[in-house]
Amino acid sequence: MFTSTHPTRVPDPDDPSTLMKEDGVAVCSQMWIENFREPDKTVTNLTNYLRRFELWVLAYQKVCADEMGAYMPRNAIQRSALEDLLALRNAVLDSRFKWGARLEFFIKSPKDKTEYESLSKRKIRAILTTTQPSPFQDRIVQEVLFMILEPIYEARFSQKSFAFRPGRNAHTVLRVVRRSFAGYLWYIKGDLSTILDGMKIGMVISALMRDVRDKKVIDLIKSALVTPVITTPHGEGEKKKKTKRKYQKKRVLAEDEPKPDPYWLDTFFGFAPEEAEKLPSWGHCGILSPLLANVCIDELDRWMEDKIKELYRPSKSDVIWNNPDGEAEQGNTSWPEFVPTSGPDKTRKIDYVRYGGHILIGIRGPRADAATLRKQLIEFCDQKYLLKLDNESLPIEHITKGIMFLDHVLCRRVVYPTLRYTATGGKIISEKGVGTLLSVTASLKQCIKQFRKLNFLKGDRDPDPQPCFRMFHATQAHTNQQMNKLLSTMVEWYRYADNRKKIVNFCSYIIRGSLAKLYAAKYKLRSRAKVYKIGARNLARPLKEKKGQSPEYHNLLRMGLVESIDGLMYTRMSLVPETDYSPFPNGWRPEHEKALLEYIRLDDPKILEEHRSGLREQGLVSPQDYVSMLVWNYKRNAIGLDQLPATVSHGNNIESVKANPENDDEMNRSEGDREERRQAAQM
């Protein structure tokens, strides 16, 4: 017997390749499944996930994608980078990692070519005393912590919060408001965004420790909050003013440098509503800051959920919300927003949504209930967050005045639909009903304000478009393309507004007038009327060709020597799509959460067995029976037993074919004949 003389090789614990046993995405998926399976369980073993090198590699890939502008596959990461990444992980586990390091790094960005050992004292002093971007290694640690903490708290967060969370956005809030706030008369709108500016470290840590009891992770986050952030003193940067050169050389991006945001995207970011403008940034937490803010404000969400149950007072004479849970579908199901009136005796109920630091509370009942709730809310914020609020910061407004939220106005429309129902004896009765519709309308005033902030127009009562000179040196084709992307994004933003056609048509008018003035100045055409005469209403014709020379442009276009010019979109109101009134389901959840919950439910052996028994009773095929059928058909065709009966879809028939001894003998004989033929061929 041969015996190997080479000793068995023991895997090197410091070799990064031996530590990557699984894919990082698979590890993250398992964390999401575990936390959604037991959402109320206190987590104590996060250090084990902090040791998983797969998560560190995945974090490195994500940070490189933000830094370089391109995703780096795992097989493209150099071994030296993996070794540095392993050194960073060990430093974090051994408590040797320091946030905000300026000169000493465990790992550097792939595009950072600076030799810090050869820097002069002046440059070192500038690095240590001025504002610098977050170090590359800090962002990797933030990503790892974020991947570990996000599934824990996403399984615990209230369904009433919608900002800084995956699968939820401003559109979700508007659809929830349209779906659930139709019957409310009084509204409390509150601005708690000062919480996003920063909270006391003790409050943040205590909020974290309600669900997480891992000392290593808590100490790491506490260190990120405590370590001071070095910033440039105010006024120091204004001392040296560079004189503007007459000619500025065109800046060329490096090969590994990401491209800046395009003009249309940068412009649309300026359209962000007031509620979405502020993004929290606490100490060295970086991308962890929004998650920590939601962790802290989640206590307010839970308190409001208790108030919703406490203040619910059903009325038997009311036609809506009169059942114990108060959430059943009632009223006119074909018109979900229609809420019939009930006279003075109404069900008392409240609802609540939060987007970041802004809250919206709807109250159905007397104004005294709203005043009492406001007083209790002020006391809660004072005790829990040390936030001093008053009645002016939490105004109570009636629905008839219009409530502004996320640049949309919530108001009420009284409607008189014809209600048809069957009376006793089968007689159909038609009568006029009285009800209300909740109208979610985009604010034209706010739209004008945003355009004025972006220098697209001036004036208020009679808005006058202004030329967008940032696109002066771009071609007509590129300029039209950028503006079409901006218009397409605005159409999507105002998707759920009742006045979608009107507001998008106004945006198209402002952008078209701005481009017309730009082209008039660029091509010296003096007026917008002349621009429209040459370039048509949608500015699709070339403006630089003189009269009689347009065939030359078409010839160049046919040869591919010039860009095709796309006309501006939505130049007429009829071209704007209709408002999206698709019904929003009650108890809605994002797609990833529904997939997780469905996977966990099907993973339960009892539920899986119930599904199988139900399929068998209905004469259908379960997945296991289907696989057995495919294997049996494969064997049958391979053996060549055409005389065997074909398998059918019923699982019992499959079992009967298997259990027939004659079929087994036939199969054995055929296998013996095949073996004899194979031996004869070899001889």
Image: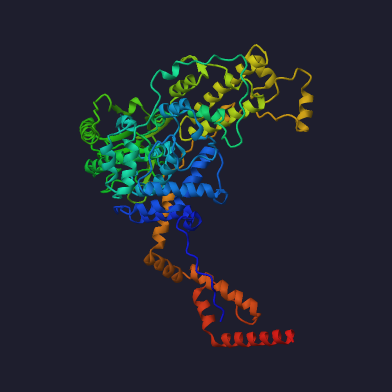
Q: Work out whether residue 300 or residue 536 is closer to the camera in this orientation and state it.
A: 300
Location of residue 549 (image quadrant): top right
Q: Work out whether residue 497 or residue 542 is closer to the camera in this orientation and state it.
A: 542
Q: In which quarter of the image is the C terminus?
A: bottom right
**Residue at horizontal 70%, vertical 20%?**
543
Does residue 264 sit above or below 143 in this rendering? above
Q: Work out whether residue 311 or residue 145 is closer to the camera in this orientation and state it.
A: 145
**Residue at horizontal 43%, vertical 52%?**
28
Location of residue 272 (image quadrant): top left
Left or right, 62 with respect to 557, comes to left
Q: In the rendering, at what x and y percent does residue 301 appear?
A: 29, 40
Q: In the rendering, at what x and y percent does residue 638 appear?
A: 64, 77
Does residue 211 sit above or below 474 in this rendering? below
Q: In the rendering, at what x and y percent does residue 296 appear?
A: 30, 39
**Residue at horizontal 28%, vertical 26%?**
393
Left or right, 683 with respect to 91, comes to right
**Residue at horizontal 43%, vertical 46%?**
88
Is residue 337 at all visible to an observer of this figure? Answer: no
Is residue 336 at all visible to an observer of this figure? Answer: yes
Q: Quadrant of the N terminus?
A: bottom right
Q: Work out whether residue 15 or residue 359 is closer to the camera in this orientation and state it.
A: 15
